[in-house]
């Protein structure tokens, strides 16, 4: 598993995974390209044998106390192997390094696998956004993780996150 910072050169590979993973509400290539360039964003790719098989993104302005996980996606054949968890942990470490104390995200209510991952990493549901994901009309579950509480509960979490 090779997790590295995404570059604009990764856009086509990221978009192939984005469109396959989110067929009805994928981000546009223009929006994703802007995220890859933005100072407030931190995007990762997971590579195997030189091929991008996953990506993940964080929005976190340095010095702000909150951050947002924007997306995590893997090619379908590689889901369930812990790769999404590894990318999530790297993003959480980056959020912490930027000064965030809380991390938020939205997850589709019809994606119990992703919801289970977030719960297992300490995220808690704080709200629901009815019919948030369009055109499907699927609710968004808004989740929050308190990074300080997580660090206190798992003192070795930082070392696990940086070795992923």
Image (spheres, rainbow, N blue to C red):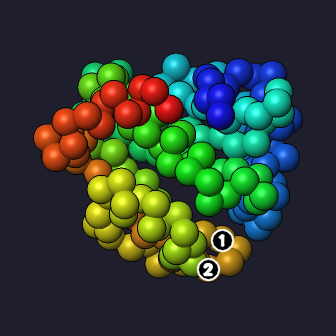
Element carrying mark 2? loop
Residue 30, x across and y down, in percent: 77, 37
- Look at the picture and state if 106 lies above or below 109: above
The N terminus, quarter of image: top right
- Look at the picture and state if 147 lies above or below 164: below
Mark 1 residue crowding within 10 angstroms, few (<14) / some (14–19) / many (20+) = few
Residue placed under numbered mark 1 in the picture? 134
- Look at the picture and state if 138 lies above or below 89: below
Residue at the spot 25% in from the left edge and 34% down from the top edge: 156
Question: In the displayed structure, does residue 15 sit left or right of residue 141?
Answer: right
Residue 82, x across and y down, in percent: 56, 51
Kindly identify which numbered label has been placed on residue 99: none
Q: Nearer the viewer, residue 102 or 157?
A: 157
Q: Nearer the viewer, residue 3 or 62?
A: 3
Element carrying mark 1? loop
Mark 2 residue crowding within 10 angstroms, few (<14) / some (14–19) / many (20+) = few
Q: Nearer the viewer, residue 100 or 80?
A: 80
Residue at the spot 42% in from the left edge and 26% down from the top edge: 162
Residue 46, x across and y down, in percent: 67, 35
Q: Is residue 101 visible?
A: no
For the residues labelled 2 and 1, say whether their Cβ atoms are less than 8 Å apart: yes
- Tell me the distance, in whole angstroms, between the alpha carbons under discs 2 and 1: 5 Å
Kindly identify which numbered label has been placed on residue 137: 2
Question: In the displayed structure, does residue 137 sit left or right of residue 85?
Answer: right
Q: Is residue 123 visible?
A: yes
Residue at the spot 21% in from the left edge and 43% down from the top edge: 154
Residue at the spot 78% in from the left edge and 28% down from the top edge: 10
């Amino acid at each position: 598993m090779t997790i590295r910072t995404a570059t604009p050169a990764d856009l086509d590979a990221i978009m192939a995974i984005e469109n396959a993973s989110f067929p009805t509400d994928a981000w546009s290539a223009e929006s994703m390209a802007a995220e890859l360039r933005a100072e407030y964003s931190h995007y990762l790719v997971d590579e195997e044998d030189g091929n991008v098989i996953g990506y993940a993104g964080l929005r976190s302005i340095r010095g702000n106390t909150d951050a947002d996980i924007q997306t995590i996606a893997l090619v379908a054949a590689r889901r369930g192997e812990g790769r999404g968890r590894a990318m999530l942990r790297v993003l959480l470490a980056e959020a912490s390094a930027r000064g965030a104390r809380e991390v938020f995200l939205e997850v589709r209510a019809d994606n119990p696998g992703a919801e289970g991952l977030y719960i297992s990493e300490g995220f808690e549901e704080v709200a629901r956004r009815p019919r948030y994901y369009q055109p499907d009309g699927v609710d968004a579950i808004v989740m929050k993780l308190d990074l300080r509480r997580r660090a206190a509960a798992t003192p070795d979490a930082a070392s696990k996150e940086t070795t992923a």
